Image: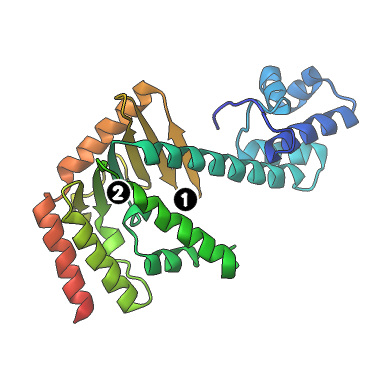
């Protein structure tokens, strides 16, 4: 995980850092002794206790075993990791809202192109989703993000959808048909380009996750790479350039926009028959 100082003393990250320090001090060990006995670098352990580094789960497992803390550190690490994910996602949404150009490769239908019914279906499937008012709040928040597509001037959006997305229908056939139709209608807008990456294209540099590259009005760009329960906001220009090149390679492998639109329309007709 990337380094970052703890800014909120009430955060899960701060709780993890404080617990690491407390457990070491309770055992009467210095950082040097801990480093020698666990074989982790002393400066690395200091950064963990200062909250400057989040590290990885196996490190927490090792320290849990060392202190006999019965999985406490792993549980705190999971909370801190989710907290960081949410913070980065909020930053991603701010960049998305002000972007003038967006290039996306998606292994899910992007929230910007979801219907309300489809968004409700997807969001209700999360394991910790309690439904009710909270579910409706999340659906409303997702649909409200689409207002940015109606700006004047509207952002230029290019979406490459993996074919696997189109082969995984929603449980309700009508919800799925309406979603496919919405994709077709969205792709007819001058500011939105839709491409499909066929499974026959094989392996590619973005396989296993989704990517958004977002250009701002001043010409700068940021990227957001997302996988299963994690998200990474990339602001370093050199790293963004590498991800953009990967996106360009995938775009070259995708169907042209006209063929992509016909592809989605065929699936829509198959769903209706």
Pair 2/1: label in front: 2
In three-dimensional space, the C-alpha distance between marks 2 and 1, rounded to whole angstroms, equals: 26 Å
Helix, strand or loop at disc 1?
A: loop
The residue carrying mark 2 is 149
Which quarter of the rendering shows the N terminus? top right
Q: Position of residue 168 (x, y in %)?
A: 32, 67
The residue carrying mark 1 is 228
Say whether residue 122 is left or right of residue 202. Answer: right
Task: Tell which of 208 and 15 is nearer to you.
Answer: 15
When asked about the image quadrant of residue 270, the answer is bottom left
Q: Are marks 2 and 1 in contact (CB under 8 Å)?
A: no
When asked about the image quadrant of residue 252, the answer is top left
Q: Which residue lies at the image location 43% right of the left edge and 69% below the top edge?
A: 121
**Disc 1 packing (10 Å; few <14; some 14–19; many ≥20):** few
Mark nearer the N terminus (2 vs 1): 2
Which quarter of the rendering shows the C terminus? bottom left
Can the viewer see residue 131 in this picture? no
Please say if 36 is above or below 200.
above
Q: Which residue lies at the image location 30% right of the left edge and 26% below the top edge?
A: 241
Q: Which residue lies at the image location 35% right of the left edge and 51% below the top edge?
A: 147
- The residue furthest bottom is 273
């Amino acid at each position: 995980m990337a380094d970052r100082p703890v800014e909120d003393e009430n955060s899960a990250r701060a709780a993890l850092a404080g617990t690491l320090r407390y457990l070491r001090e309770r055992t009467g060990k210095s950082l040097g002794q801990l480093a020698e006995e666990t074989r982790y670098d002393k400066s690395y352990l200091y950064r963990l206790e200062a909250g400057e580094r989040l590290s990885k789960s196996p490190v927490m497992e090792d320290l849990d075993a060392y202190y006999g803390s019965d999985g406490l550190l792993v549980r705190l690490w999971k909370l801190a990791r989710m907290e960081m994910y949410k913070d980065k996602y909020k930053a991603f949404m701010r960049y998305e809202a002000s972007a003038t150009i967006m290039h996306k490769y998606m292994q899910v239908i992007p929230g910007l192109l979801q219907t309300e019914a489809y968004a409700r279906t997807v969001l209700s499937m999360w394991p910790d989703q309690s439904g009710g008012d909270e579910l409706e709040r999340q659906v409303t928040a997702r649909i409200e993000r689409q207002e940015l597509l109606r700006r004047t001037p509207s952002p230029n959006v290019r979406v490459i959808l993996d074919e696997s997305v189109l082969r995984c229908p929603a449980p309700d056939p009508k919800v799925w048909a309406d979603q496919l139709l919405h994709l077709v209608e969205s792709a007819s807008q001058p500011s939105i380009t839709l491409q499909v990456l066929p499974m026959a294209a094989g392996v590619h540099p973005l396989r296993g996750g989704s990517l958004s590259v977002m250009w701002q009005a001043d010409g700068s760009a940021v990227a957001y790479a997302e996988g299963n329960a994690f998200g990474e906001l990339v602001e370093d220009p050199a790293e963004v350039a590498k991800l953009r090149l990967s996106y360009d390679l995938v775009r070259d492998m995708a169907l042209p926009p006209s063929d992509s639109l016909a592809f989605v329309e065929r699936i829509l007709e198959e769903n209706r028959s």
